[in-house]
Image (spheres, rainbow, N blue to C red):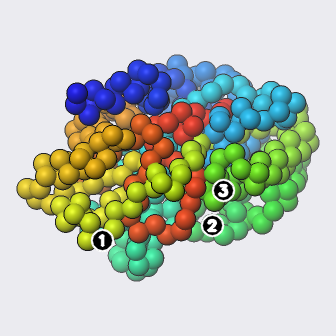
Amino acid sequence: MSDVDRLLAWFESGALVRPDAGVPNTVDLSRAIASLCGAPGIALSPPAQRVADAIGRADHIVFVMADGFGMNLVEHLPQDSFFRPHVAMEMQAVFPSSTAPAITSIATGRWPAAHAVPGWFTYLPDHNLIATILPFIERFSKRPLAELGVTPEQALPVPSWLPRFKHEPLCYMPAFITGSTYSNYFSDGEPQVPYEHLSAAAEAIVARIAASRAPTYTYLYVPFIDAAEHEHGPHADAVTKTLVMVERAVASLAGQVEGRARVVVSADHGLTRVAKRDQHEIKEGDPLMRLLRLPPSGEPRVPSFYAREGRADRFAAAFRDRFGDTHALLTIDEVEALRLLGPDALSPETRRRLGDFMAVSATSDAILHRPDSPMIGFHGGLLPDEMRIPLIVA
């Protein structure tokens, strides 16, 4: 059985979620919000229209992007929680199910196949380096990409469409990322407001809406759930405590703006727990590394590989010999044919950045190279826990 056939069997069994533009998803959410906020020329697919109808028209729209808040967390909430009864529908994350691809899809209304940000670690072929794209640094040296001659326009080729919104945009960002290169890309000249405490951001948004005489759009990025999951795993007590904090802040916000604003909550992805025994590090000097011209990039859950000239077949055989029980190794042509990164063909830049192969796991295994810090929670793959995200409307 070929690796494509194995992947299709995993989809058929329900072990993995097949990306499907025919069901509501992150791109649909972005396009629905843009349309509701008056951006011109937004064509809505039937799923995007479903999302827009679920949100409904309102003079003031508040979008809370709760990083890492997958349906697996929603389903563990008590029935009398605030979030659970306000779930309007389940949606799919884009694939790879990771922050960099998903937030860029929110910023642009485009699929990862088009916007060319396929992972946390993104290869930039024109500069022959691997970027940690959201912090906008070189992966290993941590040098700012600007010092290496990389401009935001080169790294992030599809512009944000936030300036097209007719509702007055404002972005509330954690203080540690406000004004960063990526935050500036996301807001594209629209104002950003830093916050230290989520409750303070919620109160500021309430005050903004109360004082506004024209329609507004407020984007609130919340990283705390994701951070707790990475450190402790999705269902740890620390994650539950963080989720309760976020839920209380959003419930207070929604209660105070009820009748004047619509509060929308969703996520970029969910997370899955990866046991230490299932974290496989490919180190310098590994026989696989001698067949590659670059270190693996993308995501530990769906790494991309760049074979040395003439060694693609040898690499594929060696990889399958070691990881074939848990992973399907796909060529980039196969990734494109399966439309894993979106319903359209890969853009030329996306294709260049993906390299020669992508590995997809049917389990919670991860493949790491020089990890920055120990983690228990991971995302990026096609497991239901990673791909299922909520649309919450209050």
Q: CA distance from mark 1 to mark 3?
A: 28 Å
Q: Which residue is mark 2?
A: 177
Locate the C terminus by quadrant.
top right
Left of 264 or right of it: where is 150?
Answer: left
Judge the density around disc 1: few (<14), some (14-19), many (≥20) Cα neighbours within 10 Å: few
Q: Which residue is mark 1?
A: 284
Left of 249 or right of it: where is 362?
Answer: left
Nearest the camera: 32 or 247? Answer: 247
* Amino acid type at mark 2: Ile
Numbered label attached to residue 301:
none
Numbered label attached to residue 232:
3
Of label 2 and label 1, which has the lower sequence position? 2
Task: Determine if residue 354 is in view.
Answer: no
Q: Would you place residue 380 above or below residue 121 in this image?
A: above
The single residue placed furthest to the right in the displayed view is: 256
* Amino acid type at mark 1: Glu
Q: Would you place residue 115 above or below residue 58 in this image?
A: below
